[in-house]
Image (cartoon, rainbow, N blue to C red):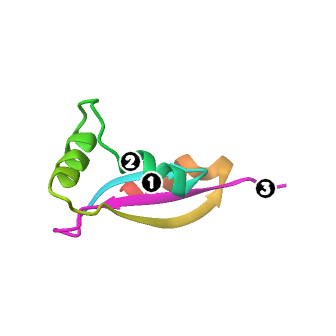
Amino acid sequence: MNMTTQIYTLTDPTTKQVRYVGKSNNPIKRFYKHYKYNETKTHKNNWINKLLDNNEKLLYKILEVVDYDKWSEKEKNWIS
């Protein structure tokens, strides 16, 4: 049985600029983990917290479903 995972993006709703590329085995659960206020100070979390403070909606899109053993290579391709 071939396991798969998803490559996804987080996009700014105002500028439509992709701000983050990631991977998830459970994209719905991962989206909700991103979509909550986070106290950890990272560039990504600060950006998401600002959106939440302004009642803006984070845009989430699955780009590709990939074989699990190839996700790192695929994620790097999407980032570049």
Q: Could you tell me the amino acid type at mark 1?
A: Phe
**Image point (28%, 29%), residue name:** 40
Quadrant of the snapshot with the N terminus: bottom right
Q: Quadrant of residue 43?
A: top left
Give whichever of discs 3 and 2 has the lower sequence position.
Answer: 3
**Image point (39%, 54%), residue name:** 21
* SS under mark 1: helix
Magenta segment includes 33 = no
Considering only vertical position in the picture, is 28 above or below 34?
Answer: below
Q: Which residue is mark 1?
A: 31
Q: Which residue is mark 2?
A: 34
**Image point (54%, 46%), residue name:** 72
Q: For this rendering, which residue is in front, 3 or 31?
A: 31
Magenta residues span 1-17
Q: Could you tell me the amino acid type at mark 3?
A: Asn
**Image point (62%, 51%), residue name:** 70
Mark 1 to mark 2: distance in Å?
5 Å
Give whichever of discs 1 and 3 has the lower sequence position.
Answer: 3
Q: Is residue 64 left or right of residue 13?
A: right
Q: Could you classify mark 2 by the number of other residues whose Cα lies within 10 Å: few (under 14), some (14-19), or many (20 or more)? A: some
Q: Which residue is mark 3?
A: 2
Q: Residue pushed farthest right?
A: 1
Q: Could you tell me the amino acid type at mark 2?
A: His
Mark 3 to mark 2: distance in Å?
27 Å
Callout 1 touching callout 2 (CB < 8 Å):
yes
Q: Could you classify mark 3 by the number of other residues whose Cα lies within 10 Å: few (under 14), some (14-19), or many (20 or more)? A: few
Q: Is residue 62 left or right of residue 4?
A: left
